[in-house]
Image (cartoon, rainbow, N blue to C red):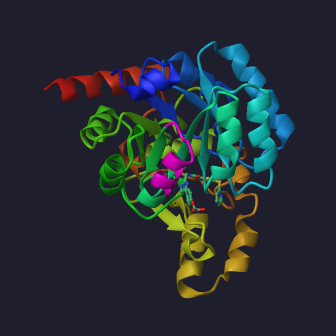
Amino acid sequence: MKTRITELLGCKYPLIQGGMAWIAESTLAAAVSNAGGVGLIAGGSAPIDYLRDQIRKCKELTDKPFGVNIMLMSPNAEDLAQLCIDEKVAVVTTGAGNPGKFIPAWKEAGIKVIPVIPSVALARRMEKAGADAVVAEGTESGGHIGENTTMCLVPQVVDAVEIPVIAAGGIADGRGVAASFMLGAEGVQIGTRFLASEECQIHPTFKELVIKAKDTDNVVTGRYTGHPCRNIKTKFAKMLASGEKDGSLTPEQFEEVTLGSLRKAVQDGNVEEGSFLCGLIAGMINDVKPCKDIIEEMMEQAEKLLAK
Ligand code: TUI
């Protein structure tokens, strides 16, 4: 499993953890890095002091490389981007926007830059802007999503750029990893599978929802706001989806009722008002395990399949 991604990031496995807002903190990131992947702390829309604290905690928990995800829609993005430089973070991934203006300063600081992109056009732009790799993220992913699928997007991005491509969206076992490699990816980004890990600090109700989810227990909300998000199909998510469809919820009302809903899901396990962001592959996930077991089983299965 040595690829340009393991070489670039100095890790054992070509696997990075998704930068899940409100979810990915130092305990999870360190567990993934200690298991041979690259863990990520999500900046989300957190205050700068929170992220600094999380980065420092992670440095205490692991001596392996780890990274930070910058969510570009955050009003704090600029400050958090600078913090990654000040704290000498090894890797930065970005989501929900074009990180072009930050790339020169990150590169100058020796940070490996890996934008998450939903299209070939943006992958090309990121390569020109100096990105070290890209994550091609299919619409199967949880949270904020693009339109193209992993199966269709990954090979098109692989054909379009020279830099290594990491596949994301709908990958939760060795079959998904092997398939990604067949599509030309040199690494995988895993998010949803780590929701059901022992080290993930989300509310037990959230883990329970992931484990119990069937293939159809998933819904995309907020397309009409311009920020489509994939969630577990709770009563709240169904209300949002039908309000959007039948016009009983205006985009403004949608924004109002979803304000703070990520925190309500992650910290409180509030199924009445929380948004449980989660990928389409949750139906395949049936147990909570340590990150080390998840990663080793996944990579062992992938290696066997790829050797066939
Ligand atoms: O960023 C994600 N997933 C996320 S961010 C998030 S927090 C949030 N909450 C509510 C609304 C919006 C965000 C939850 N999940 N994944 C990576 C990703 N990036 N998916 C899609 C994109 C993307 C979209 C447009 C990247 C770039 C882009 O560029 C547009 C442009 O400016 O050209």
Q: Quadrant of residue 106?
A: top right
Drawn side of residue 47 relative to residue 140, left or right: right
Quadrant position of ligand 1: bottom right
Can you give x and y, in whole percent of width and height, for residue 219 in the image? Answer: 48, 64
Residue at coordinates 71% horizontally, 42% vertically from top-left? 43
Between 299 and 246, which is closer to the camera in this rendering? Answer: 299
Determine whether 19 is above or below 86 in the image: below
Can you give x and y, in whole percent of width and height, for residue 159 in the image? Answer: 31, 49
Residue 286 visible, this orientation: no
Between 140 and 204, which is closer to the camera in this rendering? Answer: 140
Drawn side of residue 182 relative to residue 39, left or right: left
**Magenta segment, which residues?**
122-132
The secondary structure that dominates the magenta segment is: helix
Question: In the rendered view of the protein, which quadrant contains the N terminus?
Answer: top left
Check residue 125 for magenta coloring: yes
Q: Residue furthest right?
A: 49
